Structures are given as structure tokens and as C-alpha cells.
Amino acid sequence: QVQLVESGGDLVQAGGSLRLSCAASGSFSRITTMAWYRQAPGKQRELVARITSGGTTNYADSVKGRFTISRDSAKNTVLLQMNRLKPEDTGVYYCNCNVGDYSGTYYNAWGQGTQVTVSS
């Protein structure tokens, strides 16, 4: 099983920046797509950004031009650089990975979440 550990969440003023990191560890064969989701209070969890094993990225419209997702496949980490943060970016940010085990089975894994709070 894989363990995903996020870090980097914090309280920041609007217009500021944060960088989130997610590291995968444990027993697995490979990780394909890596993504960041977020959940604001009282709202459903939503996709923020996603990156495939080939490096293709896609973003939620609300973060395009402000957030950048990247990955280091050798280190099994995914980063989310968040610039020009807005109060509406506040929420718990979750790392999500599509993981393949040694039997060839793929499954979805989630981290425990890291809190991002943007004050106005």
C-alpha cells in the first residue's frame, strides 16, 4: 500500500504564495496520474490540478495562470505552486494518486490533507 503525505499548507494573505508538496512512500510498482483536490467548508471536493506520468497537465478554470503542478517521478513527489492566492482558494488540499501495485492492479489513493487559509 502507498502512503501519501502532504505538507506546505499555511495561513497566508491574499496575493501571497504557497507551495504544497506530496510524497508517496510504501510498497507500489508505479504511480501514473498525480493530482491535487481541494475541499472548502460546506462544498464538495473539487479537482484543482492534475499531471499525468507523461507530464500532461490540466487545471481547474479558477486556478489557471496562478497555480502550477509539477512532479518528480524519481522521488514520487508532486508539487503545487500556488501564486496570487485568493480567499476563495481556502480549503483542505488533498493529494491524489493513481497507484499500481505489483499484481498489476491500480487503485486511487488519497493523502490526509493540508489546510490552506487565505485571508483577505
Image (cartoon, helix red, strand yellow):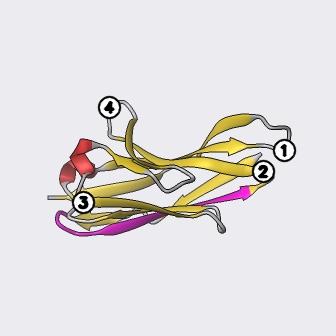
Q: Main secondary structure of the magenta part?
A: strand
Secondary element at image label 1: loop
Secondary element at image label 3: loop
Please tell me which of labels 4 and 3 falls first in the chain. Answer: 4
* Residue 26: x %, y % from top left: 77, 55
Q: Amino acid at mark 2?
A: Ser
Please tell me which of labels 4 and 1 falls first in the chain. Answer: 4
Q: Amino acid at mark 3?
A: Arg
Tell which of 21 and 57 is nearer to you. 57
Q: Marks 1/2: CA distance?
A: 5 Å
Residue annotated with mark 2: 29
Please tell me which of labels 1 and 3 falls first in the chain. Answer: 3
| Marks 1 and 2 in Cβ contact (< 8 Å) | yes
Point out the image quarter for the N terminus: top right
Q: Is residue 55 left or right of residue 44?
A: right
Q: Amino acid at mark 4?
A: Lys
Residue annotated with mark 4: 43
Q: Is residue 112 visible?
A: no
* Residue 95: x %, y % from top left: 52, 49
Q: Which residues are magenta?
A: 14-25
Please tell me which of labels 1 and 2 falls first in the chain. Answer: 2
Q: Residue at x 35, y 61 (%)?
A: 68
Q: Residues within 10 Å of mark 4 (few under 14, many from 20)?
A: few
Residue depth check, mark 1 versus mark 3: number of the one nearer the observer: 1
Residue annotated with mark 1: 102
